[in-house]
Image (cartoon, rainbow, N blue to C red):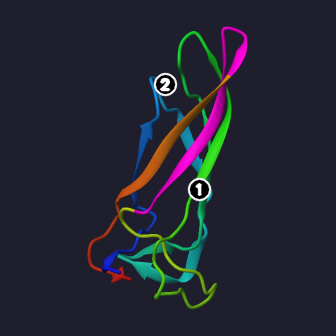
């Protein structure tokens, strides 16, 4: 497995809708390392879950959605929690539903860490 940058709290996550809807504001629920930092910021370890609110596909109403990003690192584990860190290019999918003309309609998207927030600390 190639070395990739470890994601810290300055990471950038890109949302790609699976259709014509416009993403809203994601609410990330990170598990942060209490000991390990990269570029003076805490790193994110383990699975990164999120929920989504405020998505739009006029004239529909967004009801609910969420998903998670699972780390692809396998060899490096954070010392306190023993979990692998998230890295650049780790990705996940989200699922949600709209009320579209009175009927529930499923929607999907993908989330990808496109910038780890730092470029010096890497792991595999």
Q: Quadrant of residue 66?
A: top right
Residue neighbourhood size for the residue with mark 1, other residues' Cα within 10 Å, grouped as few (<14), some (14–19), many (≥20): some
Horizontal arrangement in the rendering, residue 60 relative to residue 63 (left or right): left
Q: Quadrant of the N terminus?
A: bottom left
User: Nearer the N terminus, badge 1 or badge 2?
Assistant: 2
Residue neighbourhood size for the residue with mark 2, other residues' Cα within 10 Å, grouped as few (<14), some (14–19), many (≥20): some
The residue shown at (49%, 24%) is 21
In the image, residue 98 lies in the stretch drawn in magenta:
yes
As drawn, which residue projects farthest toward the left? Answer: 119
Q: Mark 1 and mark 2: span between their CA atoms?
A: 19 Å
Q: Is residue 12 above or below residue 47?
A: above
Residue located beneath label 1 in the image:
68
**Image x and y of residue 44, in percent:** 51, 70
The residue shown at (66%, 8%) is 101
Count of numbered labels shown in the rendering? 2
Horizontal arrangement in the rendering, residue 93 relative to residue 7 (left or right): right
Q: Which residues are magenta?
A: 90-104
At numbered mark 2, what does the secondary structure look like: helix, strand or loop?
loop
Q: Quadrant of the C terminus?
A: bottom left
Nearer the observer, 48 or 124:
124
**Image x and y of residue 75, in percent:** 46, 88
**Image x and y of residue 118, in percent:** 31, 69
At numbered mark 1, what does the secondary structure look like: helix, strand or loop?
strand
Q: Is residue 113 above or below residue 104?
A: below
In the image, residue 115 lies in the stretch drawn in magenta:
no
Residue located beneath label 2 in the image:
21
């Amino acid at each position: 497995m190639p070395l990739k940058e470890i994601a810290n709290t300055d990471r950038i996550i890109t949302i790609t809708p699976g259709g014509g809807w416009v993403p809203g504001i994601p609410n990330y629920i990170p598990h942060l390392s209490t000991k390990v930092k990269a570029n003076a910021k805490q790193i994110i370890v383990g699975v990164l879950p999120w929920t989504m609110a405020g998505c739009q596909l006029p004239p529909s109403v967004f009801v609910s959605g969420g998903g998670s990003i699972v780390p692809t690192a396998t060899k490096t584990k954070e010392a306190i929690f023993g979990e692998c860190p998230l890295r650049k290019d780790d990705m996940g999918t989200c699922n949600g539903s709209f009320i579209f003309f009175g009927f529930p309609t499923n929607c999907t998207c993908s989330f990808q860490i496109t910038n780890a927030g730092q470029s010096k600390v890497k792991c595999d």
